[in-house]
Structures are given as C-alpha cells and as structure tokens.
Image (cartoon, helix red, strand yellow):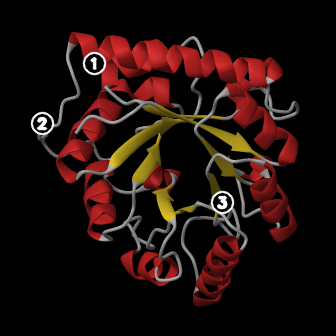
Amino acid sequence: MERQPVLEVIAVDVEDAKAAEEGGADRIELVSAMSEGGLTPSYGVIEHVVSQVSIPVYVMIRPHSRSFRYSTDDIHAMTRDVRVAKELGAAGIVIGALTGASEVDLLSMQLCMAEAQGLGVTFHRAMDVSTSLTEALQAINTLGNVERVLTSGGKQTAPEAILELKQLQQLGGTLNIAVMAGAGVTIEGINKLVSQTGITEIHMGSGVRREGSFDHPADSQLIAQAKHQLLLASQQFMNSSGMSSGRINRGPMI
C-alpha cells in the first residue's frame, strides 16, 4: 500500500509545537521528560499545545521509565490519561506495553485502547525491546486499530537497522499497518533511510534541534529542511521502484 510521506516531530512544549507546525511537520508527538525517554505530559501542556496548533497532536501515554511492563495500578493511570488526552482534544496517543516475557501485552493494550475510541494510535518503541520484531508487529496488528508502529528496527538508532526496517516495512504492507522510523534520524540521513527501506513516515526529535540536542528547542528551519528532504526522497523512491508490500520471512530475534 502506498503511503504519503509524513514527518512527525517530538514536542515537549508549546514552543516546540509551534515550530513543528511552522516548519511543515505533519504531526506532533507530545511528550515530557525526554531524559527519561519520554513520559506523559501534564494535562495543562496537552490542553495548551492542542489549542495553539492545527496539525494532529499525539500524546505519549507512559507513566514511568522503569520498563514497558505495567501493573494494574499503572494501567489504571494510563487509561485515565488516555481519557483526558481525548477530552483535551488530542488527535491520538502513543502507547506500548510488554509482558514480563518481552512480548506485546495485548490485555493491557486492549484496556487502554478501549478508552481510545476515535483517537489515532501509534505503538511506540517498546517493540524495539520485544523478543521478536515481526512477532510484535503481527501481535500489534491483531489489536485492530493501531495505525502505525514507531521503531528503530531493534537497534539503538534507525540508521543502524536498514535491513530490519525494510523487512518491517514489507510486513507492514501486508498487514496494512504503517511503519515509522525513528531514533537517531538526521536530515542528511533521510534519503538513505527512505531509499533503502521504503519507509516514508519519519519521526525526528534531536535531529531538528540545534546541536542535535534537546537542550535546544525544535527549530522550524531545520524541520522545513527535513520535510523537504523527506518529500524528495519519497518521490525518488516511488519513481524508481514504487511501494512494495511483499511478504517476508520471520525477522531477527532481538
């Protein structure tokens, strides 16, 4: 299935969100505590960001950074956070949960997603520490209304996982679930990532900030450059080979 190029930018506050929209980003992932890998932002931040931008805002639903395994109390908090994010006007949520065996926690996901009716859903990089990327993607697909997965292909950064990302992209095509590449993506690296994997949904954070650091706010000019590169790379890929949706063998264990 051919998908339109999408640039998603991480925002931690209204300044980031406005820069993302000004630079041409298609979607915002709103988070807090990037030093912890990204946690649920406050309700006040969610409300203010949603009111200040017109592009879709997807809210991170993650109560702690200890692991992606959640207790009954954690799930209670997460379902409440999903409900409030929806009430505050978020377009979607970013969420993920694993079992103690590092497989997708379908029960916890179902409980959270019962509150997410009407919202878009991204399963985040919890899948990168799952037992098997392809099995995780297949399990996520059974949930029914997850639009996409965010992944670095099981590696520390997406550029290190070209083969794994290409395999996931092909499997995603058969399942009709989008694969979005993120972690360590730079403006200069977008063309190689797109041309070698066929992935045209790109997630960027530090790559669109001065000095490549979350110590600086998102930069609208860098975001515009990233969007331009993504559009060029996506067009070149489609012209040369088209979007592939062939089936693949079982992927690597990670």
Number of labels in the image equals 3
Mark 3 closeness class: few <14, some 14–19, many ≥20 residues within 10 Å: many
Instruction: Give the residue pinned by disc 1.
Output: 238
Q: Which residue is at 82% across, 66% downward?
A: 42
Q: Residue 91: image x %, image y %?
A: 59, 60
Q: Considering depth in this image, is 152 or 29 the residue closer to the camera?
A: 29
Q: Is mark 2 on a helix, strand or loop?
A: loop
Closer to the eye: label 3 or 1? 1
Mark 3 vs mark 1, CA separation in Å = 31 Å
Amino acid type, residue under disc 1 in the picture: Met
Q: Considering depth in this image, is 142 or 200 the residue closer to the camera?
A: 200
Closer to the eye: label 1 or 2? 1
Mark 2 vs mark 3, CA separation in Å = 32 Å
Numbered badge on residue 246: 2
Q: Which residue is at 37% across, 76% downward?
A: 106
Sequence-wise first label, 3 or 1: 3
Query: Which corner quadrant of the image does residue 169 belong to?
Result: top left
Is 103 rendered above or below residue 84?
A: above
Numbered badge on residue 59: 3
Amino acid type, residue under disc 3 in the picture: Val
| Apparent side of residue 64 relative to residue 109 in the rendered image (left or right) | right
Q: Residue 207: image x %, image y %?
A: 68, 25
Mark 2 closeness class: few <14, some 14–19, many ≥20 residues within 10 Å: few
Amino acid type, residue under disc 2 in the picture: Gly
